Image: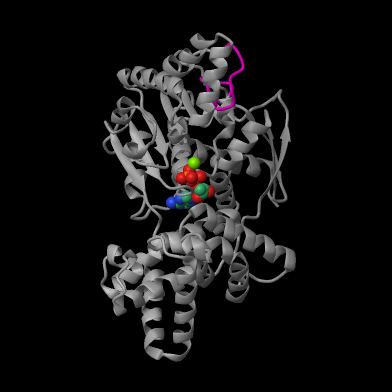
Amino acid sequence: MLSNLDVITHWNKAIEYTRSRSPASFEQWFSSIQFDQLDEGVLRLTARDGFVRDWVKAHFLPDLLTQLDKLLGQPGAQGIRVQWSINSDLENPVCAAKVSRTIPPPPPTSRPVERLASVPPSRPPALTVNLNPKYTFSNFVVGPSNELAHAAALASAGGGGPRYNPLFIAGGTGLGKTHLMHAIAHKVLEGRPVARIVYVSAEHFTNEFIEALQHHKMDDFRTRYRTDCDLLLLDDIQFLAGREQTQEEFFHTFNALHDADKPIIVTSDKYPQQLQRMPERLVSRFTSGLVADIQVPQLETRVAIVKKKAYLEGIKLDDEVAVLLAQNVQSNVRELEGALIRLAAKSSLTGRPIDQEFTLSELAKAAPAQRDIMSVEDIQRAVCGHFRLSNAELLSKDRHKSIAFARQVAMYLCRQRLKCSFPELGRAFGNRDHTTVMSAVRRVEALRAKDPQVNAHLEAIEQRLAASEE
Ligand code: ADP
Ligand code: MG
């Protein structure tokens, strides 16, 4: 049984350790936290508000609890439960608020939610709420598909390495662009809690701009984005396509920040040159720093991501199941994550363990959604590769036997794997009649069943397709 004095000593040691890990932001948060009690494995804390509680929970508690566990002689046991209370009036906070002359005054009016405003030291930047606490650098799995974007993002957050301004992160949906943006914000705030960071989607930027125009608040809008901003994170810039007035405003925002050497990070689902209805002068600004892309991660990286997510969500997952998931959900990390969460939810509802059999049956149920990952072009490419034909030959009117056979095989595979309609396929194969496609598909179906050579061709192409999905 620990005496009260022992408990306080342990708590103080754990707190000193936490302070040493994050000296820059410690006061910012722990001046709004009060230690009440540690008794029989229950740690009672009070936070000034829910936001402080959530932040401390996400950013400091795991380390703090590990440290306490160690001090109490039960490392790894995770024996401590935390009970939170909220009280805006703390009698005895863990530490006093740091007073610094360099901290700017609080914003005069309430700001839109995406604002991470400058704040006085006693109050944490309350509008960081819409940063996802899980989107940190430590939760981001780095692999060949994203290492450049990751390194550049880390550098722009002051994590070392050359800093490019602007940094333009391009990549398909669900591949971690927003995650990296939030990670930059978290890291900058960790080092400098009062940093004036604006994280905003291009859509929100547009809406705010329109609102400012309507209500004659352009001065406020410009102060917010040009003067009161140390770091601008603009997500999904492709949304600005064709919005000329917003583009114009953004162009000036960009220049003002760039001239003041304030970092600008932009994400997009396309490379700058591929952005449609975007003026050349903006495109050339985007390419003036570093354009880092994120590709679809390879199998190994996907496995590592699934494992990381499972760990973060507290889902117990065997290595084989992680591999199965990663093999089956290939094109998008968000979907991969979704598959894992669904699996865990199903497992807890039905009481079935997450083993290979259960995973396979659940994946099979979700399979239709996977089909559209592959396109007619992918299949045509694989068939051309196998039969050593050009795409033009495949789509031509050439009735030479070997070319015609390859064409029929491609049609059959498209029909079977993509479930395209016959007229759709006719169009995709050089504007042929749908009846031609129908008879091609039937012919290959029949041949496959009785001719081992045809079957061998098909299997080789299917292997090619599977490999190209990797
Ligand atoms: P995007 O903005 O590119 O559409 P997000 O950043 O929203 O994609 O990512 C989608 C999901 O996938 C998020 O939950 C994110 O955490 C996760 N994710 C993507 N890439 C990685 C990675 N390399 N490591 C860990 N999680 C990742
Ligand atoms: Mg995004």
Of 160 and 289, which appears nearest the observer?
289
Q: Is residue 115 magenta?
A: yes
- What is the image's colouring? one colour
Q: Residue at x 69, y 71 (%)?
A: 352
Q: Does 356 appear above or below 129?
A: below
Q: Quadrant of residue 247?
A: top left
Residue 188 at what x, y percent from top left?
A: 43, 32
The span picked out in magenta is 106-123
Residue 329: percent from the left, percent from the top? 50, 62
* Magenta part, dominant SS: loop
Which one is nearer the viewer's eye here, 416 or 155? 416
Provide residue 189's location: percent of width, then percent of height: 47, 31
Q: Is residue 429 visible?
A: yes
- Tally the numbered discs: 0
Eyeballing the image, is 68 above or below 76?
above
The one nearer the camera, 406 or 118, is 406
Image vertical order of residue 209 relative to residue 394, above or below: above
Residue 386 in the magenta stretch? The answer is no
